[in-house]
Amino acid sequence: MDKNQSFYERVYEVARQIPSGRVTSYGAIANFLGTGGSSRMVGWAMNNANTTFPPVPAHRVVNRLGLLTGKLHFGSPNLMQELLESEGIKVEDDKIVDFKKRYWDPATEILK
């Protein structure tokens, strides 16, 4: 990971590595980047991810409880859930079902 990249670019680099059918949290990305208290900044990065190339699968980043807290930043209120469900992730009441099973931790999955 290039330390000269902007914070948002580093967030996007991590998010692009989340496999289809898996999710991570804002805090997990922040911790991986060594900025543990910046979960909210990761959320802001995800809010702006729709204009980046290559694309960022922002729908795969949720809060620490598995809630779709960023869903209002997608084109429609249901798009985040629809994208997750298209990857085989079940969502009920704006929460990932079997969140722990679907959870992807960059700290254990990515070599620094």
Image (cartoon, grey):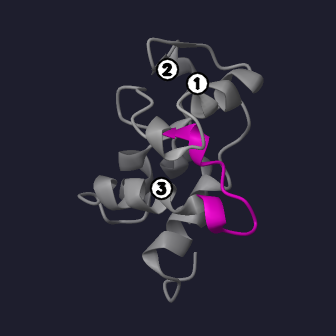
Q: Which residue is mark 2?
A: 99
Q: Which mark is residue 47?
A: 3
Q: Which residue is mark 1?
A: 102
| Disc 1, SS | helix
The residue positioned 71% from the left and 41% from the top of the image is 19
Residue kind at label 3, given as amino acid type: Asn
Which sits earlier in the primary sequence, circle 1 or circle 3? 3
Q: Position of residue 56 (x, y in %)?
A: 66, 56
Near-viewer residue (111 or 89) = 89
Give how far apart the Cα atoms at labels 1 and 3 are.
Answer: 22 Å
Provide the residue span drawn in magenta.
50-61
Disc 2: CA contacts within 10 A as few (<14), some (14-19) or many (>=20): many
Tell me the quarter of the image containing the C terminus. bottom right
Is 97 placed left or right of 31 in the picture? right
Residue kind at label 2, given as amino acid type: Phe
Outermost front residue = 76
The residue positioned 73% from the left and 19% from the top of the image is 88
**Looking at the image, residue 4 lies above or below residue 84:** below
Disc 1: CA contacts within 10 A as few (<14), some (14-19) or many (>=20): some
Near-viewer residue (101 or 39) = 39
